[in-house]
Amino acid sequence: MINDIQKQILKLKEENDVCILAHSYMAQEIKEIADFTGDSYALAVKSAKVPQKTVIMCGVRFMAETVKILAPEKKVILSNPDAGCPMAEQMDKETISLVKEQYPDYAVVAYINTTASLKTICDVCVTSSSAVEICKKLDADKILFIPDCNLGSYVAKQVPEKEFKLLHGGCPTHAKISESKLLEAMKKHPNAKVLVHPECQPDVVQHADYVGSTSGIVNFAKQSEDKEFIIGTEISIAEELQYACPDKQFYPMSKDLICPNMKATTLMDVYGCLKGTFGDEITMDEEKRLQAKKCIDEMIRLG
Ligand code: 13P
Ligand code: SF4
């Protein structure tokens, strides 16, 4: 049952021609008022197609920037100005320009969790759901994969015919999942399938029955004949699945697997965005936007 704030939000959203996009890590009450929820890839592709003039992105900053890059005519609002992604802030354009000089014959593949500035000097973007396919299809044998070395390492194993150079970036939330904790959970739940996000460390990923994006994990678990699952990603995914599939059991790797940035957005923030009293409108220099768009267009073309 929807609550009073949710009712107000749905009303304001219709009256003001606003589309609300919510990443899979948002709280359930936010997903309930969203027009569309999904992983980074789905949100990026969807954002360019929605008919509304304004988009509120309930997620983190690089996701709102991606919407602005793909749909510059729309007013794009990040639901909470403090919601950044620490991994996206780990590498900047200046540093990577220097690294590129050291590896001139490598194509630069950027995880979408990067700033718009950094995207301007990358060859192609990838998301967790599209990285393997895109690296396979990419017309390059040598790949400099930034910033996530865990995702990069996973992709490199799936694409052994290519040479990968990885840098030391990664997600602090997924870094909390250790192999020893996973082995403990596997011992406790011997019949559970292990589903993990590729941002987890390689010694965790090696035990997985399924490795995929946030939406990939949700879809896999919903369609599976199995009844028990250990979930190796942010806690919201285990919560969403437990709510959606009451006849199955979902065991989060840890109760404190919370991304504070994704959890920064509240229903009142979304209400404030609709009232014009909260949120951060994304603006971008046109030259920068066009330059950053090239690697996202390439992602959509190959993905
Ligand atoms: P997805 O592309 O799987 O939604 O991942 C985004 C993210 O930031 C996971 O930590
Ligand atoms: Fe960034 Fe990690 Fe949070 Fe995803 S879970 S938004 S990669 S900090």
Image (cartoon, helix red, strand yellow):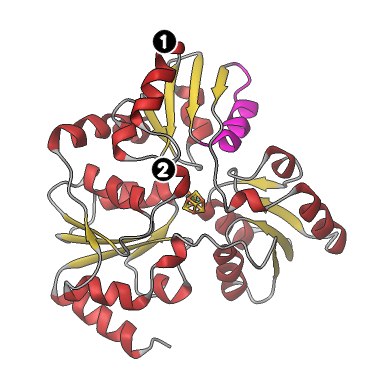
User: Residue 122, percent across and down?
Assistant: 35, 26
In this view of the protein, which residue sits in the foreground, 185 or 11?
185
> Seen in the image, is 89 located left or right of residue 292?
right
Above or below — where is 281 with respect to 71? Answer: below
Q: Residue at x 73, y 49 (%)?
A: 178
**Residue named by callout 1:** 104
SS for callout 2: helix
User: Residue 206, percent across and down?
Assistant: 74, 40
Span of residues in magenta: 148-161
Q: Residues within 10 Å of mark 1 (few under 14, many from 20)?
A: few
Under mark 1, the amino acid is Pro
Q: Residues within 10 Å of mark 2 (few under 14, many from 20)?
A: some
> Seen in the image, is 257 located left or right of residue 19?
right
Question: Residue 231 colored magenta?
Answer: no
Quadrant assignment, res 108: top left
SS for callout 1: loop
Under mark 2, the amino acid is Glu
User: Residue 262, percent across and down?
Assistant: 45, 61
